[in-house]
Amino acid sequence: MKLLFLTLLAINLALAPALAAGGNNKMPPPKAKALWDYIAKTSPYAKWGQWPRYKGVHRSRSPHGPYNQIYVNQAGLSSTKAPVNYGTIQVKATQTKSGKLKDIVAMYKVKGYNPEAGDWFWAMYTSKGRPLAAGKLAGCIRCHAAMGDNDYVLVHQFR
């Protein structure tokens, strides 16, 4: 009985990172196409939750304006303090004044990817999923660094 308990405990500990990263879905590598395939097909971002105090459409500033809606996967939503869990993905769907999808921006927390800037992989896509920029994007890092103590997350304050 003790051996069975220890075996189950070991299995649970081995699976914990994958579960925190978003369930049974294998997380993508930090590459623009792989991340797009994940957020568009494997685990569609529009089905994810939102930060508790940032639900729905909000006014936004440049370069993500004039409106946006932010979605966060379960790894992010289950993060209770900074730094967020590895595997966290936050997707910002930017919109025009008329509500039409303008572009999609993603932050993806990947262990060891960029320790100097919170281990975030950044990507920007057209509304159809064509990558516009991806990687260690200086503009993204520069703006989000203002909330470095909040793990570069601007619209949700961890306590």
Image (cartoon, rainbow, N blue to C red):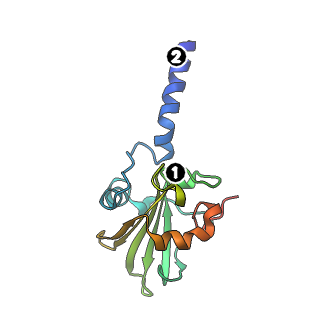
Classify the position of the C terminus by image quarter.
bottom right
Q: Give the amino acid type for the residue marked by disc 2 in the picture.
A: Leu
Counting from the top left corner in percent of width and height, residue 10 is at 51, 25
Residue under numbered circle 2? 4
Q: Along the polypeptide, which appears first: circle 1 or circle 2?
A: 2
Using the image, determine if residue 120 lies above or below residue 146. above
Q: Residue at x 55, y 74 (%)?
A: 143
Which residue is label 1 attached to? 75
Q: Nearer the viewer, residue 45 or 131?
A: 131
Residue 152's x, y, as percent?
A: 57, 64
Image: 57 above or below 15: below
Residue plotted at (53% across, 82% down):
61
Using the image, tell me which numbered label, if any, was put on residue 137: none
Dot 1 crowding, Cα within 10 Å, few <14, some 14–19, many 20+:
many
Secondary structure beneath dot 1 equals helix
Q: Quadrant of the N terminus?
A: top right
Q: Nearer the viewer, residue 138 or 130?
A: 138
Q: In the image, what residue occupies the spot 47% across and 79% down?
A: 64
- The answer for how far apart the CA atoms under marks 1 and 2 are is 29 Å
Q: Is residue 131 left or right of residue 113?
A: left
**Is 100 positioned to the left or the right of 3 in the image?**
left
User: Count of labels shown?
Assistant: 2
Residue drawn at (40%, 71%) of the image: 104
Amino acid identity at mark 1: Ala
Compare residues 135 and 70 and report the one nearer the observer.
Answer: 135
Residue 93: % across, % down: 43, 72
Residue at the outermost front position: 116
- Please indicate whether residue 42 sits to the left or right of residue 153 in the image: left
Q: Quadrant of residue 105?
A: bottom left
Where residue 62 appears, as percent x and y from the top left, is 50, 83
**Horizontally, is 41 left or right of 68 in the view?**
left
- Find numbered disc 2 in the image and state the secondary structure of the residue it sits on: helix
